[in-house]
């Protein structure tokens, strides 16, 4: 055997050791999701309330999937938190099921028919 063969063998063992250590630590190390388990109201308060006063109107006129995708790409830390936040924003914008909207107060009696016609304007006198 020559001295160059011994030098090559002397480098292989430490390289295998370093590679094994890298593989073991890479599989163990994992990012932690700090938003995991938080209710959507808390997610909104922590991430959105600094710019938006209220969750009302943020989901208005948007498709569920596009809202979810936007939140996932820009504001949420995971797909699950984006899904929960999107569902929360949609639930805040939709009226509760089974409850009629409150009618505006009117000076007319309750049984009087509602008309969209207005009385004619007064004609100016010369």
Image (spheres, rainbow, N blue to C red):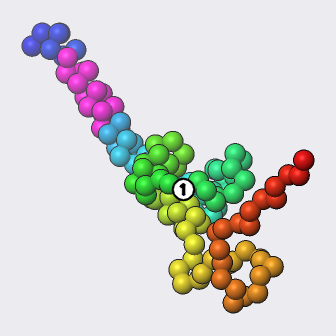
Between 27 and 105, the one lying in front of the other is 105
Would you say residue 85 is visible in this rendering? no
At x 59%, y 53%, the residue is: 58
Number of marks in the rendered image: 1
Between 19 and 104, the one lying in front of the other is 104
Q: Which residue is mark 1?
A: 59
Q: Is residue 20 magenta?
A: yes
First to last magenta residue range: 8-21
Q: Image height check: is 103 above or below 126? A: below
Q: Residue 126: x and y, percent?
A: 90, 47
Q: Image height check: is 107 above or below 126? A: below
Element assignment for label 1: loop
Q: Residue 40: x and y, percent?
A: 58, 63
Q: Is residue 71 magenta?
A: no
* Quarter of the image where one finds residue 123: bottom right
Between 72 and 67, the one lying in front of the other is 67
Q: Is residue 74 left or right of residue 18?
A: right
Residue farthest toward the right in the current orientation of the protein: 126
């Amino acid at each position: 055997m020559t001295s160059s063969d011994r030098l090559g063998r002397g480098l292989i063992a430490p390289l295998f050791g370093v590679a094994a250590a890298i593989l073991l630590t890479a599989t163990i190390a994992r990012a932690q999701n700090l938003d995991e388990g938080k209710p959507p109201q808390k997610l909104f308060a922590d991430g959105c309330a600094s710019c938006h006063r209220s969750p009302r109107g943020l989901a208005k006129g948007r498709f569920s999937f596009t809202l979810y995708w936007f939140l996932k790409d820009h504001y949420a830390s995971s797909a699950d938190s984006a899904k929960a936040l999107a569902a929360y924003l949609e639930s805040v914008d939709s009226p509760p099921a089974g409850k009629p909207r409150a009618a505006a107060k009117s000076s007319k009696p309750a049984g009087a028919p509602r008309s969209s016609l207005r009385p004619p304007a007064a004609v100016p006198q010369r």
